Image (cartoon, coloured by chain):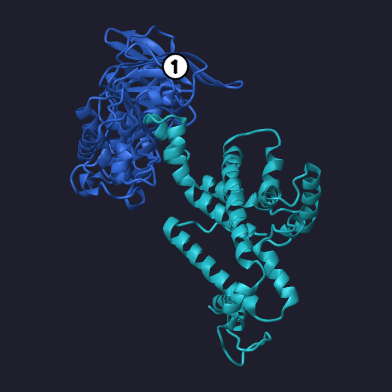
Amino acid sequence: MSEERDFRLVVNVLGWAAMAFLVFPVIVTLLVSFNGSFFIEFPPSSYSLEWYRNIANINKIGEATLISLLIATIAATLVTVMALGTAMAIVRYDFAGKAALTSFLLSPVAVPIVAIGIALVQFFIRLDIAFTWYSLVIGHMVLVAAYPVRTIVASMTLYNPNIEEAASSLGANRWVVFWTVTLPQLKPGIISGFLFAFLISFDNYPISIFLVRGGLTTMPIELFNYISQNFDPTPAAFSTLYILIISLVIMFVEKRYQVISLSVGR
Amino acid sequence: MARLDLSDLCFSVGALDILRSVNLTVEEGTCLALLGPSGCGKTTTLRCIAGFVQPTSGSISFNGQPVVGVPAHKRNVGLVFQDYALFPHMTVAENVAYGLKRRSVPAAECKQRVAEALELVQLDTLADRLPRQMSGGQQQRVSLARALVIRPNVLLLDEPLGALDRKLRDQMQVELKRIQRDSGITTIIVTHDQEEALSLSDRVAVMFDGQIQEVGTPTTLYREPGSRAVMEFLGASNILDGTAVSAEQDGSHIKIRDSHTLKVSDALESGRDVQLGIRPEQFLVETESPVGRENSIAATISEVVYKGPHVELYVETEQGLRLLAQRRIRGIAAQDTFVIGQSVFLTVEPDAILVFGR
């Protein structure tokens, strides 16, 4: 019995340590955002809401957040639609180069993000669309493409392909089978894939930094610019709001669509 | 409802012949069991009829209308999968209504037909459940209702009771038989379970290696199979090699392995090599020597297997001939207890011995 107890002890310690590593920075951010003094200090000696009011003073923060939202929505939508086709091809059919494509798409992207950023900017300059919306959307699509493929492949391998034959024997043609059976069955994979793509695009810095110039800017870039010139806790306040909103969205989606937690590493 | 004809149906994948000229007719409103070991091609036959795969050659017709080339969704075939294949995101009623919606049946009629179908399978009270909230037996019945509600030309059941436990399977057998008879839909049941095949169908087709070996009613197929292979596949049997030694008016004597002579009711010319098939339950097992009776074999019990309603006795004669006999257990008294090493006498009627050519 003592080995059982030891085993549990080790598992518990590791589990709580992992939780602490994940949660501790969030707690620090939260506390610092209510800091009363101008400098970031922990634990805070006094509390205020001043830094929340100061969020508006981050340069172009509203406009940049809106652009980030739009870019993330467009890139995630396009990538998810493309991933649906890719996942079906990978799971259902055999074709030349399938193994290579699968491991490329299903492994975390092996190239450093900064390298992708440099490659993209050179590529877009050649195409003469650098520093435009197009380049930003396409760049972000490259960044997030692997995630929905993974989640949709995962949910496809989980479901019983007989239900499509059952539908077809009941009189549904290829399109109707897709709309009424295939798509609803893949919903958890599609939604979680979209969410991954959206979130990764939304707070991406290293790709965007290469693709924006002038008026075109994104939220993480403006936030970082602010941090590099100011030392006050305003970014902590912004981050706290950001974490709160994202957590609510994820909780809602999890509850509403019972999105299975299809883990993706990067 | 339709008559189903398969003629010269072949299906190959590369160099592998899965179906090798399947010929089969299922009369309108009857139920046929397609029975065979796994890998014999019975599921492929089903998939050809449903339209999921196209045969390499040969024809399939419903009521004389050829259907090869007609896509699956236009064949009006009802299918029940072994794993039920219910739509997990739809309620029971929505599952059953699926086929009617594809046929644009008006809402009121659709509702009524769904209710009727659910009543037929006795699930009318569970219409709003999701499949995952139901037991295996209930899901099976939803699947059946979903297939029946479209009034299919042919109903195809793929190992319908395979995933159910014993007791439920027995219940569903009776249920399935009633539903098939009441609905009068031409039905094919694919199964590897001989008991299921015998008890559910009007006729049984035994399939080996991509071909139909024999078709007949359950009774004739069990009692008088046309070949040794069919006899061995359908239930337990003793197969003995022998040679006809003398012919008589009412039959002939067959010598088995220099040891015994058995009388059969078939007239066979002397010197002909044959195989004899005897069902274990055809042996009369006695502990006293039945003096002066024909076809009596003295043997020693080497193994006793208790099966509830009967015991299986594995016996061996002095000459090394091994046989399987069955004895039904009547009464609660212990006089039917057999022990290993006990001497017994097996007797079989001449007309209970089947003779196959060699």
Residue B23 screen position, x and y as percent: 41, 14
Classify A216 as above or below A97.
below
Specify the chain shown as cyan. Answer: A
Using the image as rendered, state which of residue A225 and residue B340 is in the foreground: A225
Q: Residue at x 48, y 56 (%)?
A: A259
Using the image as rendered, state which of residue B108 and residue A90 is in the foreground: B108
Residue B52 screen position, x and y as percent: 46, 27
Residue bearing mark 1: B68
Q: Toward which corner of the image does residue B1 lie, by quadrant?
A: top left
Classify B241 as above or below A223.
above
Using the image as rendered, state which of residue B71 and residue A233 is in the foreground: A233
**Any part of residue B246 in sight:** yes
Residue A242 screen position, x and y as percent: 57, 69
Determine the residue located farthest toward the bottom in the rendered image. A45
Q: Colour of chain B?
A: blue
Count up the numbered dots: 1
Residue B157 screen position, x and y as percent: 35, 31
Q: Residue at x 56, y 52 (%)?
A: A194
Q: Residue at x 72, y 42 (%)?
A: A100
Q: Toward which corner of the image does residue A166 lie, by quadrant?
A: top left
Say what amino acid the circle numbered 1 marks: Val
Classify B147 as above or below A204.
above
Q: In the picture provided, is B268 more to the left or to the right than A39?
A: left
**Any part of residue A21 in sight:** no
SS label for mark 1: loop
Q: Toward which corner of the image does residue B113 lie, by quadrant?
A: top left
Q: What chain does badge 1 belong to?
A: B
